[in-house]
Amino acid sequence: MKPRIALVTGGYSGEAEVSYGSANTIQKNIDRNKFDLYRIDITRDGWYYTNTEGVKSTVNKNDFSIHIGSQKILFDGVLIAIHGTPGEDGKLQGYFDMLEIPYTTCDAGVSSITFNKRYTVAVASFSGITVSRSVLLFKEDSTKFEFLAEAKKLKFPVFVKPNNGGSSIGTTKVDKKESLDNAVARALKEDSQVLVEEFIPGREFTIGVYKTKGNIVPLPVTEIISKKEFFDFEAKYHGASNEVTPAEIDNALKNLIQTQAVKIYKIFNCSGVVRIDFIYNSADRKLYMLEINTVPGQTDASLVPQQILSAGGNLKDFYSAQIEECLRKKEK
């Protein structure tokens, strides 16, 4: 019997739109000769499986099972395609750990840490990875002078962004200290924590890294050339950027980015495929890590699929390898 794989999509955040696009790409590229795939939509209104006739049935959260007619379906593994909570912040991972169902992403602890931008840069900095200076704000302290005074000590311009989340939703580039309050208020609409981070001038690069058969593999480097002021949601998902894959860089810089990406993957004990964003400042010849995306987008506009194709691979083989890596966890 073929392994039964649940493809979970949706989520509880504004990133659900991207999640559905990722799930569509994955669903089209699953090898049905190897796996039986069941798409599960996780929303605040409920967790549902919809069959080919459009009939919706509720997921039993006690054991993450579904019923098709009189048949009860239990899953051998889970392919997580939820960006944002609860699929990228460790919540679902912890749930599946309790049920002893393997999944394709980083584990609960790693997902929780990397979803928090401040914790990510703190661990990276402690491990010798170069990151930008930043200040963290908690919502309950947002009106206190001490925070604003500390944030205004940073070198402007700065980025003000929700500390937990992705896709650049709620992120603002702030050129003047006088504009800091409004940017913080915007970010607080998305999260109860806000990160204020110094802007690093330079070229922006991103790279996917994944594990297969025990080996950590870096994908080709992509350079992001945003048509907007920075690589925001519109630039990422609505064509307001030029993405050059492979990046037009010399071997020294390519090797630096790939080596650092593999190092970061090891430091954070990642699993599955992640995408790591960098800025290279040519003036000081330093590569700065921006963030780690543990459930990177898989839409037609997303970067990891572009990199897989650039490396000479195909999505069907790639997703098969990710599922097989996931199922190996159950065998250990």
Image (cartoon, rainbow, N blue to C red):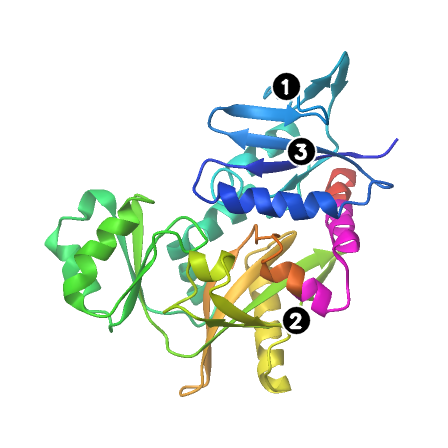
66 or 130: nearer the eye?
A: 66
Mark 3 residue type: Arg
Element carrying mark 3:
strand
**Could you tell me which quadrant the C terminus lies in?**
top right
Mark 2 residue type: Pro
Residue annotated with mark 3:
39
Residue annotated with mark 1:
57
Q: Position of residue 267 (x, y in %)?
A: 56, 61
Query: How would you rate the neighbour count of disc 2 (Cα within 10 Å): few for under 14, some for 14-19, many for 20 or more?
Result: many
Of the image marks 2 and 3, the number of the one nearer the N terminus: 3
Q: Is residue 12 magenta?
A: no
Q: Which region shows up in magenta? A: 307-325
Relative to 236, say whether 91 is above or below: above
| Numbered mark located on residue 319 in the image | none
Element carrying mark 2:
loop
Residue 107 appearing in the image: no
Of the image marks 1 and 3, the number of the one nearer the N terminus: 3
Query: How would you rate the neighbour count of disc 1 (Cα within 10 Å): few for under 14, some for 14-19, many for 20 or more?
Result: some
Question: What's the residue at 73%, 69% (across, down)?
Answer: 311
**Could you tell me which quadrant the N terminus lies in?**
top right
Of the image marks 2 and 1, the number of the one nearer the N terminus: 1
Element carrying mark 1:
strand
Would residue 274 appear left or right of 316 to someone viewing this image?
left
Mark 1 residue type: Ser
Magenta span dominant secondary structure: helix
Q: Position of residue 225 (x, y in %)?
A: 48, 73
Query: How would you rate the neighbour count of disc 3 (Cα within 10 Å): few for under 14, some for 14-19, many for 20 or more?
Result: some
Q: Position of residue 196 (x, y in %)?
A: 29, 60
Give the mark toward the camera: 2 or 3. 3
Residue annotated with mark 2:
220
